[in-house]
Amino acid sequence: MTQHLAAPLTGTSDDAPGHRHGWWRDAVIYQVYPRSFADGNGDGMGDLDGVRRRLPYLRDLGVDAVWLSPFYASPQADAGYDVADYRAIDPMFGTLLDADALIRDAHELNLRVIVDLVPNHSSDAHEWFKRALREGPGSALRERYHFRPGKGADGELPPNDWESIFGGPAWTRTTDPDGTPGDWYLHLFAPEQPDFNWEHPAVADEFRSILRFWLDMGVDGFRVDVAHGLVKAPGLPDIGGSGQLRLLGSADGGTPFFDQDGVHEIYRQWRRILDEYPGDRIAVAEAWTPTVERTANYVRPDELHQAFNFQYLGTSWVGSELREVIDVSLAAMRPVGAPATWVLSNHDVTRHATRFASPPGGGTQTREAGDRTLGLRRARAATLLMLALPGSAYVYQGEELGLPDVTDLPDEARQDPSYFRADGQDGFRDGCRVPIPWTREGSSYGFGGGGSWLPQPEGWGALSVEAQTGDPGSTLELYRAALAARKEHPGLGAGDAVEWLDAPEGVLAFARPGFVCTVNTTGTAVRIPAHGRVLVASGPVAVDGAEAELPADTTVWWTV
C-alpha cells in the first residue's frame, strides 16, 4: 500500500506557523466508540462513514484529536477487541477506503486520528489461531500463543490457577484434530480472545508491521489496549487463591500476567518506529497499574508518549482525594518528562454524570441512577477541573452532552460479554455505550435512519446536540466555551505543576500563570476571594466586589 495515503498533519519544526511542539502534551482527545457515535448507512450500527460525517462537529467542539475504538475485522465477541485481521475493516464499519477518507477529512479539519491497537490477544478467528487448532499439537503456530498441557491424570485441569478478567478460568481446553481432548490455551479475557506469546519473535515482527501499515495510512497515533498485559512471568506460575479479577497488580509488578517489566523493551522498539515518521506520531498506554509511579514507567523518554491516568478516573468527588491524586500524578510524570493525563469517563466505566450522582466510594461501575441533577452538576464541575489541569485530557463521546449512564437497559438487550459470565466484572458497560442523540426527534434521535443497536431511553432527544446547541446554560455549550478558553488562555494546557492556594475545607484552589481555578466539592455554598474576572463557570456564581459566593459542586475559572 502506498505510504502515507492520507498525509499526516505536519509541521514538526518549532518554527512552523501555529505549531505546538509535542502536540500531545496539552491535547484534548475525544474518544469515539464507533458502534455508538453515528450510523452512516442506516443499519442501526455506527460506522466510519457516520464518524466522517460528524467530524465538523468535533472540530467545532474544539478537540485536537479523535481516538477511534476498534473497527478491525472481528467476530465481535468483545465489541471488536477480538481482532481477526489487523489490516482490514470489519464490514459493519465500512472499508479501508472509508478509513482513508476519514483520516483525510480529519486532517483537512486539523484533527488528528488515533486508532486502537489490541496487541495482548487476537480473536480465535485470527488465521494464526485457526491454523494452530487445525494443525494440532506440534504446529509452529501454537508457539505464537500460550498453549500448555493440562494438569491432572488426563490433563483435565487448567495449567495454572489464573482467572479470566471476564470470569472463570483463564484457560480453555482444545480438541485435537482426531477428536480427543488436547492442550489448553490462555485467555486473560474471553475464550474467544487467546493471548499472544510475546516471547516469540514472529509476534513482535507482526506488530511492528501492523504499526507501519497504519502509520503509512496516515494515522497520528495508537491507543494501546491492555498495554500492561503483553508479557507474562516465565513459567506462568500459580498465583494462589481466588479474587484475581482485577486489573491492578501488586505494587512491585508481582502479578505474573500484568505489569511485567519485560513490556518496556517492546515499547522501546515501537517508539523507534514512531519516531521515524513525520508529524509527531504518538502511542498512548492503557496500562492499569497499582500506582501512578509504575504507570510513569510506560512513558519514559524512549517509550510511549502518554498513559491513561486511571487513578484519577477512579477518584471520588472529594476535595482532599482529588488534590492528592493531582499532586501524585504530576509528581510521577515530572521525572520522566511526560505529560499527565486526565480522564473522567470511557467505554468501560459508568459515565461520571451517573457515578457522581451517588455517595462517594461506589467505584467506577454502578447500577444506580442516583440523583440526576446532582450528578450533572458535579460532572460539569469535574470537567472544568480536569480541563484546567496541566497536561492532556480525554473526553468520552456524549459526556459533552451531560449524558447519564443508561442503568435500566433490559437484560435481553445487553451485549457486554462480561455480563453473561459469572464472577466477572459487573458486566454493565452497555449503559455507557448506548448510541448518542443528535436530534430532538427521530427513531434514533439522529444516530441513523435504522434505529440503534442498543435501545435509547425516552427523553434522549432533550439531551441531543440539536437541543443543546445555542443554549448558554447547556452542558454542550459549557464544553465548547471551556475548550475555546483552554486554547486561547496562555496559562492553560501544557505544564507539570500547579500552585495551590489557601481555601476552605472541601474547596480546591490553584493558580497557573494568569489563571486561577476554584472548585467547591462540598454540598453548600462558600465565600471565597474573587480572583479576577470570571472566564468560565460550571454554574452561576455571584461576584460581590472582592469576594464571590461559590455554589455547591461548582468550578470557576478566573483570568487574573
Image (tube, rainbow, N blue to C red):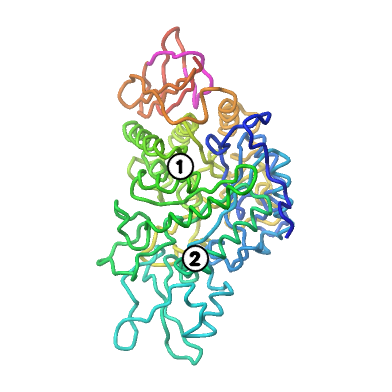
Q: Local crowd at mark 2 within 10 Å, few (<14), some, or many (≥20)?
A: many
- The magenta span reads 528-541
Q: For numbered disc 2, what is the local secondary structure?
A: loop
Q: Which residue is mark 1?
A: 352
Q: Local crowd at mark 1 within 10 Å, few (<14), some, or many (≥20)?
A: many
Q: CA distance from mark 2 to mark 1?
A: 29 Å
Q: Which residue is mark 2?
A: 121
Residue 334 is situated, as x and y percent measured from the top left of the image, at 40, 35
Q: For numbered disc 1, what is the local secondary structure?
A: helix
Vertical arrangement, residue 180 with respect to residue 511, above or below: below
Q: Is residue 148 magenta?
A: no
Q: Is residue 535 magenta?
A: yes
Depth check: 49 or 331 in front? 331
Residue 28, by quadrant, is top right
Residue 555's disc is none
Q: Indicate which disc, 2 or 1, sits on the residue closer to the N terminus.
A: 2
Vertical arrangement, residue 311 with respect to residue 21, above or below: below
Residue 65, by quadrant, is top right
Residue 529 is situated, as x and y percent measured from the top left of the image, at 40, 13
Depth check: 519 or 130 in front? 130
Q: Nearer the viewer, mark 2 or mark 1?
A: 2
Could you tell me which residue is drawn at 52 percent across and 79 percent down?
132
Residue 14 is situated, as x and y percent measured from the top left of the image, at 62, 31
Depth check: 482 or 510 in front? 510
